[in-house]
Amino acid sequence: MFKTIATTLFLVALSAGTAQAWERIDTEAAYRAQVVGNRQVVAGSGHVVVQPDGTVTGEWNGQPVSGNWSWNDGYYCRSLRIGNTDIGSNCQLIEVEGNQIRSTNDRGQGRNVTATLE
């Protein structure tokens, strides 16, 4: 019985050691290296690409996405239009885990969206 418990504890510890955790991106340099230029795909909704020139392009629910972005005090800040609708400006907390990116509105205090980086 002791051997079974020890083996179980070892396997749990081993699997916990390989799990990744969400890591915050808090510098523009890190954001540019890990995110800029890659498609951010949200299944069933669409995708966006944050461009190196400060623009944002893509498609969301069949509508074109356009806008601008900047880096401000540790947050990704964007101003977007989806089709003819101005969705406004927002600064977001950005986190990554493997090829997943999580953007949380209102400097980390609002709703979040998780996308796959391609």
Image (cartoon, rainbow, N blue to C red):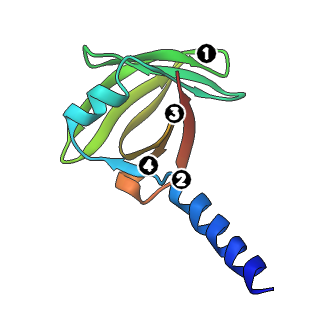
Q: In the image, which is nearer the foreground, mark 4 or mark 2?
A: 2
Q: Is residue 66 left or right of residue 83?
A: left
The N terminus - image quarter: bottom right
Residue 10 is drawn in which quadrant? bottom right
Q: Earlier in the sequence, mark 3 or mark 1?
A: 1
Label 1, secondary structure: give it. Answer: strand
> Mark 3 is on which residue type?
Asn
CA gap, disc 4 to disc 2? 29 Å
Label 4, secondary structure: give it. Answer: helix
CA gap, disc 4 to disc 1? 21 Å
Front residue (pair 69, 80) = 69
Q: Which residue corresponds to mark 4? A: 105
> Is disc 3 surrounded by few (<14), some (14 to 19) or many (20+) residues within 10 Å?
few
Q: In the image, which is nearer the foreground, mark 4 or mark 1?
A: 4
> Mark 1 is on which residue type?
Gln
Could you tell me residue 43's position as x and y percent? 69, 29
> Is disc 1 surrounded by few (<14), some (14 to 19) or many (20+) residues within 10 Å?
some
> Mark 4 is on which residue type?
Asn
**Could you say which disc has been placed on residue 18 in the image?**
2
Q: Is residue 67 left or right of residue 7?
A: left
**Could you say which disc has been placed on residue 99 in the image?**
3
CA gap, disc 2 to disc 1? 39 Å
> Is disc 4 surrounded by few (<14), some (14 to 19) or many (20+) residues within 10 Å?
many
**Could you say which disc has been placed on residue 63 in the image?**
1
CA gap, disc 3 to disc 1? 25 Å
